[in-house]
Image (tube, rainbow, N blue to C red):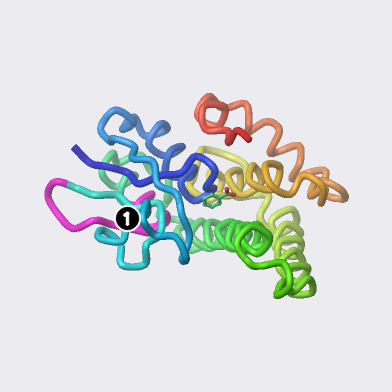
């Protein structure tokens, strides 16, 4: 059976958990809890992924695969579910990359506060990560809304997981302010069963 190294707080892992459910493959993968960071790798899949990062998917018939973009594309191809429509492939992949970039910056902000000793934290660097998030959200809310409409695609799932993480860890920054269209889209998308089932809990 395939094994997914996973942490329910990770927005990258959430993408995979949503795709597993949306593509009808949830029962084909065993979820293995993983936790850690570069300074604490004991419970991370370093033997399977030399980067020691999650999500990481082991398979019976091939090497482990990572990162979330590779795993989601693999699962979609395996189930032939069309989450990457050929006619808009580069746009959907870029939208997914934009959402992943939001997650990268938002997770880095959390790690900075959690893992770095107080005396060597760099507030301007953390704020610059949020600037990155804000610019990306503005781009999604203006240029990308067309791709958020219509049949389910991987860009939508990734954006929703990124926004869910902002609510989870950066609620005080109020990402909805000035972004009514994106907020309305997210409210509707969040009602999907697969989103409700994967909402991170404190
Ligand atoms: C978090 O607790 O925010 C987190 C956990 C795992 C990966 C990324 C983020």
Please determine whether, in this image, residue 135 is positioned above or below residue 44: below
- Taking the magenta stretch, the answer to whether it contains residue 9 is no
For label 1, being within 8 Å of ligand 1 is answered no
Q: Position of residue 176 (x, y in %)?
A: 81, 45
- Answer with left or right where residue 184 lies relative to residue 31: right
**Residue that appears at 53% across and 56% down:** 96
The residue sitting at 57% across, 39% down in the picture is: 150
Q: Residue 14: x, y in percent?
A: 49, 42
Pick whichever, 35 or 24, lies toward us.
35
Quadrant of image for the C terminus:
top right
Observer-nearest residue: 33 or 55?
A: 33
Alpha-carbon neighbours of circle 1 within 10 Å: few (<14), some, or many (≥20)?
many
In the rendered view, would you say 93 is above or below 72? below
Q: Is residue 199 left or right of residue 175?
A: left
Dot 1 corresponds to which residue? 45
Residue 153: give x, y in percent of width and height.
Answer: 49, 44
Image quadrant where residue 126 sits: bottom right
Residue found 57% across the figure and 27% down from its top: 196
Between residues 53 and 165, which one lies in front from this camera angle?
53
**Residue 63 sits inside the magenta stretch:** yes
Task: Judge from the rendering whether residue 197 lies leftward or rightward of residue 6; answer left or right.
Answer: right
Q: Residue at x 48, y 48 (%)?
A: 154
Is 64 situated above or below 164? below
Instruction: Give the structural element (helix, strand or loop) at label 1.
Output: loop
Residue lying at the far right in this picture: please name it: 178
Q: Which residues are magenta?
A: 60-73
Displayed quadrant of residue 101: bottom right
């Amino acid at each position: 059976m395939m094994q997914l190294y996973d942490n329910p707080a990770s927005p990258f892992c959430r993408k995979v958990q949503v795709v597993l459910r949306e593509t009808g493959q949830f029962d084909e993968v065993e979820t293995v809890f993983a936790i850690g960071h570069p300074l604490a790798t004991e419970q991370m899949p370093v033997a399977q992924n030399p980067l020691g990062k999650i999500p990481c998917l082991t398979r019976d018939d091939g090497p482990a695969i990572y990162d979330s973009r590779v795993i989601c594309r693999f699962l979609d191809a395996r189930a032939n579910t069309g989450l990457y429509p050929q006619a808009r492939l580069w746009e959907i992949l870029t939208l997914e990359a934009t959402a992943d970039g939001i997650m990268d910056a938002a997770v880095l902000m959390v790690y900075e506060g959690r893992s770095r000793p107080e005396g060597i934290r760099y507030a301007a660097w953390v704020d610059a990560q949020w600037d990155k998030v804000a610019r990306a959200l503005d781009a999604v809310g203006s240029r990308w809304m067309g791709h958020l409409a219509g049949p389910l695609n991987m860009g939508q799932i990734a954006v929703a997981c990124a926004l869910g993480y902002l609510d989870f860890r950066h609620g005080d920054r109020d990402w909805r302010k000035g972004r009514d269209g994106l907020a309305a889209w997210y409210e509707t998308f969040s009602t999907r069963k697969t989103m409700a089932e994967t909402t991170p809990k404190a």
